[in-house]
C-alpha cells in the first residue's frame, strides 16, 4: 500500500466515522423533534379545552353582568328613595336645630323679664299676705 492509498483509507475511515456520528446525532435530533411534536399536540389539545372553558366562563360572566345590570336598574329607585329620605331627615334636623336656636334666643331675651315678673308677683303676693295678716290682727284687736 502506498501512501496515497493509506491516506485514502484513513480518509474513508474518517468519513465512515463522521457518517456514523452524524447518523447518531440525526437519530437523537429526530427523537427530540418527535417528543416536541407530541408536546405541541398535547399543548394544542390543552389550549383547545382551555379555550372552550374560557368561552363558557365568558358566557357566564356576560349573563351575570346582564343580570347585575338589570338588578342595578331595579335598585335605582330604591337608592334614590333612600337618598331622598336622607335629605328629608337632614332637612328635619336643620329645622329642629333652627327651632332650638330661636327658642334659646327667645329664652335668653325673656329670662331677665321673667325673673323680674316672678319677683314682682312674689313681692305682690307677700304684700297681700302681710295685709291680710294685719287685717286679721286688727279685727282680732277690735273684738
Image (cartoon, rainbow, N blue to C red):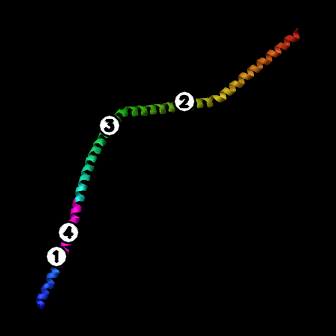
Q: Nearer the viewer, mark 2 or mark 1?
A: 1
Q: Which residue is mark 3?
A: 67
Q: Nearer the viewer, mark 3 or mark 1?
A: 1
Question: Is residue 117 located in the magenta-colored stretch of the structure?
Answer: no
Q: Earlier in the sequence, mark 3 or mark 1?
A: 1
Q: Measured from the top left, where is residue 52 in percent x and y?
A: 25, 47
Q: Residues within 10 Å of mark 1 (few under 14, many from 20)?
A: few
- Residue 27 — which label? 4
> What secondary structure prevails in the magenta region?
helix
Query: Is residue 104 or residue 80 the one in the foreground?
Result: 80
**Which residue is at a point 16% across and 78% down the rendered structure image?**
16
Q: Nearer the viewer, mark 2 or mark 4?
A: 4
Magenta residues, as a range?
Answer: 17-37
Q: Which residue is mark 1?
A: 19
- Residue 99 — which label? 2
Q: Is residue 143 above or below residue 63?
A: above
Q: Measured from the top left, where is residue 113 in percent x and y?
A: 66, 27
Q: CA distance from mark 3 to mark 1?
A: 70 Å
- Residue 64 — which label? none
User: Quick one: SS at disc 1?
Assistant: helix
- Relative placement, left or right, of 122 versus 67 is right
Query: Is residue 113 or residue 75 the one in the foreground?
Result: 75
**Which residue is at a point 26% across and 45% down the rendered structure image?**
55
**Which residue is at a point 11% across and 91% down the rendered structure image?**
2
Amino acid at each position: 500500500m502506498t501512501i496515497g492509498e493509506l491516506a485514502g483509507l484513513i480518509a474513508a475511515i474518517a468519513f465512515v466515522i463522521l457518517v456514523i456520528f452524524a447518523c447518531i446525532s440525526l437519530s437523537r435530533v429526530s427523537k427530540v423533534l418527535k417528543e416536541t411534536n407530541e408536546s405541541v399536540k398535547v399543548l394544542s389539545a390543552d389550549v383547545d379545552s382551555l379555550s372552550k372553558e374560557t368561552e363558557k366562563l365568558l358566557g357566564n360572566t356576560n349573563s351575570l353582568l346582564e343580570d347585575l345590570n338589570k338588578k342595578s336598574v331595579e335598585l335605582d329607585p330604591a337608592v334614590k328613595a333612600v337618598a331622598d329620605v336622607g335629605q328629608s331627615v337632614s332637612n328635619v334636623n336643620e329645622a329642629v336645630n333652627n327651632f332650638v336656636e330661636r327658642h334659646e334666643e327667645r329664652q335668653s331675651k325673656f329670662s331677665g323679664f321673667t325673673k323680674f315678673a316672678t319677683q314682682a308677683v312674689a313681692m305682690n303676693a307677700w304684700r297681700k299676705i302681710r295685709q291680710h295678716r294685719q287685717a286679721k290682727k286688727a279685727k282680732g284687736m277690735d273684738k
